[in-house]
Image: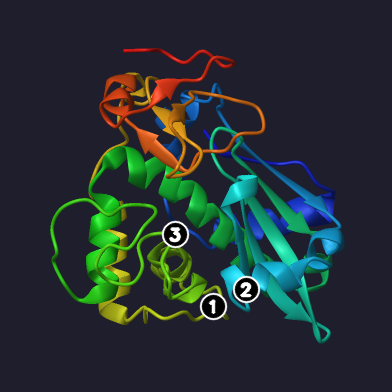
């Protein structure tokens, strides 16, 4: 069963399929976690994303020159320079609204289209395979640092490195969850040219370690993910299981763990309270 559901024109769908044909990651491993959202596939649509690019000046201050990381909006957005102007080329919507949107300008550049799509697919693999497996983010962290620090890697905050997975004063280029995009493409689609380079070099050794880590564990059972809850950002004291317009910033395996962290259930979406 395929996880990806291309919803564009014949040309657009062919570009997505070309990228998938170059990638040998077993995307069916995302299915148990997707079931927690009531999904069996991830939609891939295309749109003119130039309107988002027009606001890129603000995003550069926090996201770096190649990527706008808009967690507050519940979306990762990849940004590159096109004809001398920064432009958003792809969006990945975080759980529980998992989907990918690609910019129509990519129709003219199949190689870049493949890289952008697979970079966004890497975020889907992160949230729907690595996070449920619990140990994979640490394995990627170690691969990109040449270390074995042990413990869990937080999504936000400074993990005594000046950065964490998607946070830290060093800015977007230092966030390991973004360098993982490059690592994923190199590990599972080596024929796709990679044009993004960030602060953590993805060496051949790191590439092999990332591939081994992501293939090391079977997908968790659906029952292990359906009870997960989340809060939108580290300062929030409210948790959700699915709330339109409020994206996940930090996941908890159970409501009990969220309560232990001092959170209460949202009164609108009414997630489980135990």
Across and down, in percent, residue 194 comes to 54, 78
Question: Which residue corresponds to the image point at 37% horizontal and 78% vertical from the top-left?
Answer: 200
- Say which of 165 and 23 sits in front: 165
- Nearer the viewer's eye, disc 1 or disc 3? 3
Q: Quadrant of the C terminus?
A: top left
Report the side of 152 relative to 150 (left or right). right
Report the side of 206 relative to 225 (left or right). left
Across and down, in percent, residue 212 comes to 25, 59
Q: Are marks 1 and 3 in contact (CB under 8 Å)?
A: no
Across and down, in percent, residue 178 comes to 47, 65
- Nearer the viewer's eye, disc 2 or disc 1? 2
The residue under label 1 is: 194
Task: Provide the secondary structure element on which disc 3 rests.
Answer: loop
Question: Which residue corresponds to the image point at 31% horizontal and 23% vertical from the top-left?
Answer: 259
Q: Which quadrant holds residue 39?
A: top right
Q: Are marks 3 and 2 in contact (CB under 8 Å)?
A: no
* Mark 3–mark 2 distance (CA, rounded to whole Å): 15 Å
Question: Which residue corresponds to the image point at 82% horizontal and 72% vertical from the top-left?
Answer: 108
* Mark 1–mark 3 distance (CA, rounded to whole Å): 21 Å
Asked if residue 31 shows in the view, the reply is no
Mark 1 or 3 closer to N-term? 3
The residue under label 2 is: 61
Residue 134 has which mark?
none
Across and down, in percent, residue 10 comes to 83, 50
Q: Is residue 84 above or below residue 149?
A: below
Task: Provide the secondary structure element on which disc 1 rests.
Answer: loop
Mark 3 or 2 closer to N-term? 2
Q: Which quadrant holds residue 116?
A: bottom right
The residue under label 3 is: 166
């Amino acid at each position: 069963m395929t996880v990806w559901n291309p919803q564009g024109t014949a040309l657009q769908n062919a570009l997505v399929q070309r990228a998938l044909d170059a990638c040998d990651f077993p995307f069916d491993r995302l299915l148990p976690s997707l079931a927690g959202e009531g999904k069996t596939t991830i939609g891939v649509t295309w749109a003119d994303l130039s309107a988002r690019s027009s606001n890129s000046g603000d995003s550069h201050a926090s996201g770096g020159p190649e990527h706008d990381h808009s967690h507050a909006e519940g979306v990762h957005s990849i940004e590159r320079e096109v004809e001398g102007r920064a432009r958003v080329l792809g969006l990945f919507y975080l759980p529980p609204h998992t989907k990918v949107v690609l910019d129509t300008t990519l129709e003219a550049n199949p190689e870049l289209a493949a890289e952008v799509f697979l970079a966004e697919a890497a975020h889907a693999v992160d949230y729907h395979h690595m996070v449920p497996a619990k140990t994979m983010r640490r394995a990627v962290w170690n691969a990109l640092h040449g270390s074995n620090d042990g413990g869990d890697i937080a999504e936000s905050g400074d993990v005594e490195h000046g950065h964490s997975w998607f946070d830290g004063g060093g800015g977007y280029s230092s966030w390991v969850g973004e360098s993982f995009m490059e690592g994923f493409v190199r590990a599972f689609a080596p024929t796709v040219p990679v044009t993004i380079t960030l602060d953590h070099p993805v060496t051949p050794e790191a590439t092999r370690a990332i591939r081994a880590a992501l293939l090391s564990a079977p997908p968790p059972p659906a029952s292990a993910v359906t009870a997960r809850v989340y809060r939108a950002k580290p300062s929030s004291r409210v948790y959700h299981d699915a709330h339109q317009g409020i994206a996940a910033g930090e996941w908890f395996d159970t409501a009990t763990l969220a309560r232990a962290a001092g959170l209460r259930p949202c009164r609108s979406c009414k997630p489980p309270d135990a």
